[in-house]
Image (spheres, rainbow, N blue to C red):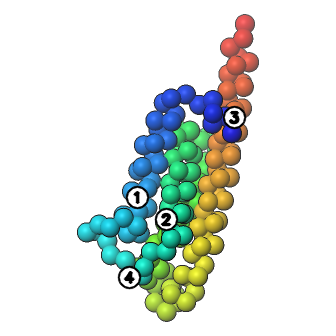
């Protein structure tokens, strides 16, 4: 957490931009925000809004650190899992193709909260790794800067 508190203003500006962009990318196709482009066949659950907001903020925090040289599979999977966790199970063509409409309602819909929890856990792990890398980089930079 100390690493986040020590970040300069441009980092927090990037956090806001990436959080809002992520929120839109997730909310529009999942129809968490009413729009004319997408339809939702099942009602939105209150839990969907929680996963949406928390994941959007976490993605913003992770992405604002910039590219990682190591790759960030946890962040990518966590962000993608959020979209599946908050989306309409019947509207998801991949799920319907794999297990049918009945399976989407009877099998996939009940595990969506677990998927959302896993997505948040992956995003928290990714943020932890990015913050640790940033702290290591700052420590090395400080050592290199001393005469």
**Which badge, 2 or 4, comes first in the chain's sequence?**
4
Determine whether label 3 and label 2 are within 8 Å by CB: no
Within 10 Å of the Cα at label 2, are there few (<14), some (14-19), or many (20+) other Cα atoms?
some
Alpha carbon distance from label 3 to label 4: 44 Å
In this image, 107 relative to 40: left or right?
right
Residue located at (67% from left, 29% from top): 137
Q: Position of residue 109 (x, y in %)?
A: 54, 81
Horizontal and vertical percent for residue 42? 42, 82
Q: Spatial distance from mark 1 to mark 4, Cα to Cα?
A: 19 Å
For disc 3, the marked residue is 2
Which mark is first along the chain, 2 or 3? 3
> Is any atom of residue 77 visible in this view?
no
Q: Is residue 146 visible?
A: yes
Name the side, left or right, on which 5 lies relative to 46. right
Judging by the rendered image, the residue that carries numbered circle 2 is 49
Count of numbered tags: 4
Q: Which residue position holds label 4?
A: 41
Dots 3, 4 in contact, CB < 8 A: no
Q: Residues within 10 Å of mark 4 (few under 14, many from 20)?
A: few
- Indicate which disc, 2 or 1, sits on the residue closer to the N terminus: 1
Q: Residue at x 54, y 70 (%)?
A: 47
1 vs 3, front mark: 3
Residue at the bottom extreme of this rendering: 102
Distance between the alpha carbons at the discs numbered 1 and 3: 30 Å
Please identify the quarter of the rendering in which residue 70 is found: top right
Q: Is residue 118 left or right of residue 10?
A: right
Which badge, 1 or 3, comes first in the chain's sequence?
Answer: 3
- Find residue 25 and name its label: 1
Q: Which residue shows up at 68% across the image and 45% down it?
A: 129
| Numbered disc 3: secondary structure | helix
Please tell me whether mark 2 sits on a helix, a strand or a loop: helix
């Amino acid at each position: 957490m100390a690493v986040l508190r020590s970040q300069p203003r441009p980092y927090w500006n990037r956090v806001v931009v990436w959080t809002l962009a992520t929120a839109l990318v997730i909310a529009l196709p999942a129809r968490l925000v009413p729009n004319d482009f997408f339809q939702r066949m099942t009602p939105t659950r209150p839990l969907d809004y929680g996963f949406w907001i928390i994941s959007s903020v976490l993605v913003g925090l992770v992405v604002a650190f910039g590219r990682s040289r190591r790759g960030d599979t946890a962040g990518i999977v966590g962000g993608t899992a959020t979209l599946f966790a908050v989306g309409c199970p019947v509207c998801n063509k991949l799920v319907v193709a794999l297990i049918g409409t009945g399976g989407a309602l009877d099998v996939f819909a009940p595990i969506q909260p677990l998927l959302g929890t896993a997505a948040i856990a992956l995003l928290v792990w990714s943020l932890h790794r990015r913050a640790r890398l940033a702290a290591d980089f700052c420590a090395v930079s400080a050592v290199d800067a001393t005469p």
